[in-house]
């Protein structure tokens, strides 16, 4: 949809989306540039330009909205009381790609190249890539005395595993999230690797079926709750052993686990 198109204009509705970069730098670096490729690494989306790189991070609630034209964008964007929230919009020859995050945590940045992109340089192996092997995961676990969940959430080691899916994968692998990573055996690590890949692929399938409708600002991913076995089920019975699911705090985040069958 956007690959091969030229960015005719950048509409900056909420400059906070570009912080800490200067909004005008984002505008000047992107206008007139052609999008040659679109790809993802971990939780980031990248639009590679014929000169430069746009980086998008959606945080918790960020998402993309497609507008058929600039006229449609300007009629709908941020108009009270029920207008479509848009932070940054890339006007193309055919349509407009809008980036929106009502909580203003998401960010849109521009870099001179892949090599200059600071977040990209700090990302580890993508958890859905071929490089994410059983051997790789085992080495990462064995090299750390931190908790196994902390290692999974470390985007510098493995990119793309968030709080929800780490809880789910650890439940499937029957591993306690507070367990020290270097105490996980090779067999247990293999089970964890299988669980991570399975959970991420199932989540991706849910996000693609039904297909995303980016033209509708109220559209959101549906069906993810159907695959969750642990996350946000505090006080409910474990679907494996029947014991009560607990919620514990880890690094300012909530972990959900069954203290009976996750060891």
Image (cartoon, rainbow, N blue to C red):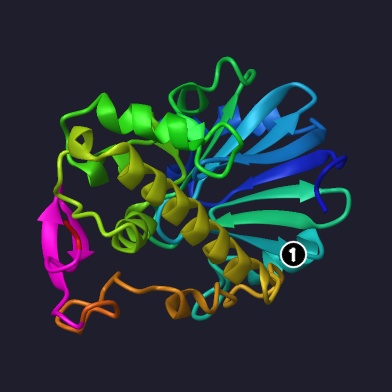
Query: Where is residue 44 drawn, in percent x and y?
Result: 53, 42
Query: Where is residue 184 drawn, in percent x and y?
Result: 24, 40
**Above or below: residue 16 compared with residue 259:** above
Query: Where is residue 117 drawn, in percent x and y?
Result: 54, 22
* Residue most extreme to the front: 187
- The reply, left or right, for residue 29 in relation to residue 255 is right
State the residue at coordinates (12%, 65%).
Answer: 259
State the residue at coordinates (20%, 60%).
Answer: 255
- Find the magenta span and give its range: 242-261
Residue of label 1: 67
State the residue at coordinates (55%, 65%).
Answer: 202
* Residue most extreme to the top: 115
Nearest the viewer among 234 and 71 is 234
Q: Residues within 10 Å of mark 1 (few under 14, many from 20)?
A: many
- The reply, left or right, for residue 88 in relation to residue 66 is left
Q: Is residue 123 magenta?
A: no
**Above or below: residue 189 compared with residue 66:** above
Nearest the viewer among 150 and 260 is 260
Residue 183 found in image quarter: top left
Query: Where is residue 28 drawn, in percent x and y?
Result: 67, 28
Nearest the viewer among 60 and 52 is 60
């Amino acid at each position: 949809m956007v690959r091969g198109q030229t960015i005719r204009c950048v509409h900056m509705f909420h400059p906070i989306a570009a912080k800490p970069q200067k909004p005008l730098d984002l505008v000047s670096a992107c206008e007139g540039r052609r999008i040659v490729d679109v790809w993802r690494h971990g939780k980031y989306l990248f639009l590679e330009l014929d000169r430069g790189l746009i980086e998008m991070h959606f945080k918790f609630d960020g998402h993309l909205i497609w507008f058929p034209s600039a006229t449609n964008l300007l009629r709908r964007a941020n108009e009270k009381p029920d207008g479509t929230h848009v932070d940054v919009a890339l006007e193309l020859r055919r349509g407009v790609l809008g980036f929106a995050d009502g909580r203003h945590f998401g960010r849109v940045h521009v870099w001179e190249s892949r090599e200059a992109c600071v977040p990209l340089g700090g990302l580890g192996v993508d958890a859905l890539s071929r490089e994410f092997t059983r051997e790789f995961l085992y080495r990462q676990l064995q090299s750390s005395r931190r908790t196994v969940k902390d290692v999974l959430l470390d985007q510098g080691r493995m990119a793309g595993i968030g709080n929800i899916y780490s809880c789910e994968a650890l439940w499937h692998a029957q591993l306690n999230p507070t367990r020290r990573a270097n105490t996980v055996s090779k067999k247990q690590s293999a089970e964890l690797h299988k669980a991570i890949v399975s959970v991420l692929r199932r989540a991706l399938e849910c996000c693609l079926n039904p297909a995303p409708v980016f033209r509708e600002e109220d559209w959101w991913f549906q069906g993810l709750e159907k695959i969750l076995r642990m996350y946000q089920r505090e006080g409910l019975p474990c679907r494996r052993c029947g014991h009560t699911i607990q919620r514990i705090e880890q690094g300012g985040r909530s972990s959900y686990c069954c203290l009976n069958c996750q060891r």
